[in-house]
Image (tube, grey):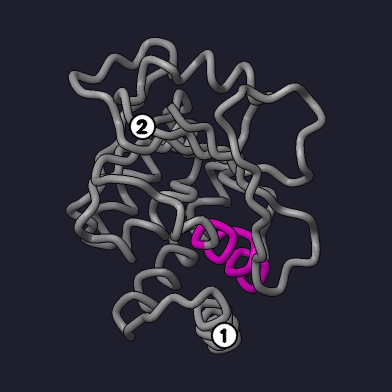
Amino acid sequence: MDNCDAILRTGLADLGLKNDAQQCEKLLKFIALMLKWNKAYNLTAIREPEAMVKRHLLDSLSIYPYLQGQRILDVGTGAGLPSIPLSIFYPEKQFVLLDSNAKKTRFVQQAMMELNLNNVSVHHERVENFKPDTGFDTVMCRAFADIAKIIDLTSHLRNPLGILLAMKGQKPHEKLPNQYEIIDLKVPFIDAERCLICVKP
């Protein structure tokens, strides 16, 4: 994993993220856990450690400047992306990870324990059935549907001042709501187009 460590540290520097040895250790341990569980749980189609660092860790962390508030919800978190990498850098924020796939939430719970992440909780639930007591400051996802559908499915989850962050590849062609911003993301070592759609109240 030596090369992974070098890629990770270079990528974090490119993103402007100050880091310490413990944070890097946790991020690389997370990749090791994904590799181990992927054999049985099919968490991700990406199976090479170096590619995981680039396309999972650095891609997730590229949105760090845009998180708002203290309570963050990750809809359709899958293997814990982007929340687990972000939670390592934001121990003061509370991350709630939501997914309807029981195998993936089991993996996330195990990763949460092994990485000693006290600011993360996991819920096995469909997004439309998830009814938290309080709305979230930021609702985010690695876009699993078109923006209109994402807004419709998550509107009950934001507080009155909350934002929605949807990670996308290419810029969407569909009609977007009035209060939105498209932010170009620069992910180290990834040439493909990446963007973040921010939907505001």
Identify which residue is drawn at 29% across, 79% down: 22
**Closer to us: mark 1 or mark 2?**
2
Report the quarter where the N terminus lies.
Answer: bottom right
Left or right: 91 as drawn, with respect to 87:
left
Q: Amino acid at mark 2?
A: Gly
Residue situated in front as seen by the camera: 1 or 75: 75
Give coordinates of residue 155: x percent, y percent: 43, 17
Majority SS type along the magenta span: helix
What label does residue 162 carry, if any? 2
Give coordinates of residue 144: x percent, y percent: 62, 30
Q: Hey, which residue is sitting farthest front in the picture? A: 178
Magenta segment range? 49-61
Q: Which residue is mark 1?
A: 10
Asked if the stretch drawn in magenta spans residue 35, the answer is no
Identify which residue is drawn at 67% across, 49% down: 195
Left or right: 26 as drawn, with respect to 53:
left
Instruction: Characterize the local packing of mark 1: few (<14), some (14-19) or many (20 or more) Cα atoms within 10 angstroms.
Output: some
Left or right: 98 as drawn, with respect to 184:
left
Q: Amino acid at mark 1?
A: Thr
Identify which residue is drawn at 34% across, 54% down: 111
Instruction: Characterize the local packing of mark 2: few (<14), some (14-19) or many (20 or more) Cα atoms within 10 angstroms.
Output: many
Local secondary structure at mark 2: strand
